[in-house]
Structure formats: structure tokens, C-alpha cells
Amino acid sequence: MSALSVAGALVSQPYGFTVSNHYYPFSTTTASAYIQEVAEEYGVDASQLEKTIKCESQFKPDAWNKEDHLGGAKGIAQFLQPTFDRYSKQMGFEEADVWNPYDAMRVMAYMFSIGEERQWTCFRKLYG
């Protein structure tokens, strides 16, 4: 997993990150910064990623649609587990965790980059 491009030593952690011994918990601010980075990395529209995530989960990393007949959409990007597993492995991201918001945003950006953005109901709702 790539870390945010900021000055100082950086260690990625689930639901937050540390820069120069200062821990930054997950928030919409850190999510927005990370979305900008992965959007640039994968050549996709950061605004579309951000708006789709806001619509899907309101930026809640623990969002879970338990009523879904396929096991429920999970996490900040509302992935079904088999979809998340398939695409994270396809991109070589073997240790990805659907509940880690940074992992989910990275896999989502990758999927947008290969034309799979229409898998999200909110993307279709927002962009046709």
C-alpha cells in the first residue's frame, strides 16, 4: 500500500497514519488527501471518487449493508467481499483489507481506472 506523499517518515496504519511520530486518525480530511493521491496515481477523477464514496458510505469506514443477500457491501467504498478480493488480487495488492479505508480507496481508484466505476450504484446515480 502506498502512503500519503507528505514530508517526514510515514508508516501506514489501518484507519490512520503516522508522520514524524504524529498519528493522524482517519477522517474525511485524510481521506480527501489520499483520494487525491490515488486518483493521480491511477489517472482518474478525484472528485468522482470522493462523491461516490460520500454517497455510498458518508465516509464511514465501518459502513456495512448487512441486509444485502450477497453478504453485504462493506467499508468506506461499499465493496462486496468477492469483488474486493478479485480486484485487489488483480492489482497485486495481496494484503488488502476491505475494512481498511485506505486499501478500499486504492482498490476503488484502480477499478475506476479500468472502467469499472459503474459497479457502484452511487456512481450510476451521480453520473448516469
Image: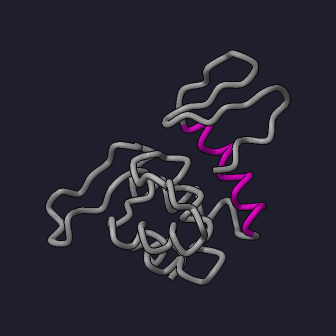
Q: Where is 128 relative to 52, above or below?
A: below
**Residue found at the far right of this picture:** 7
Q: Quadrant of residue 6?
A: top right
The answer to which of 79 and 125 lies nearer the viewer is: 79
Which residues fall within the magenta stretch?
A: 28-42
Q: Which color scheme does this rendered protein use? A: one colour
Measuring from the top left, give residue 101's x and y in whole percent.
Answer: 49, 47
Measuring from the top left, give residue 34's x and y in whole percent.
Answer: 66, 46
**Left or right: 45 as drawn, with respect to 28:** right
Q: Where is 45 relative to 36, above or below?
A: below
Q: Can residue 89 be found in the magenta stretch?
A: no
Residue at position x 33%, y 56% from top? Answer: 74
Measuring from the top left, give residue 64's x and y in whole percent.
Answer: 27, 52
Residue at position x 61%, y 24% from top? Answer: 24
**Left or right: 126 as drawn, with respect to 83:** right
**Residue found at the far top of this picture:** 21
Residue at position x 72%, y 24% from top? Answer: 19
Determine the main secondary structure of the stretch shown in magenta.
Answer: helix
Q: Where is 35 relative to 25, above or below?
A: below
Measuring from the top left, give residue 32's x and y in whole percent.
Answer: 64, 45
Q: Where is 116 relative to 14, above or below?
A: below
The total number of labels drawn is: 0
Q: Quadrant of residue 71?
A: bottom left
Residue at position x 61%, y 30% from top? Answer: 17
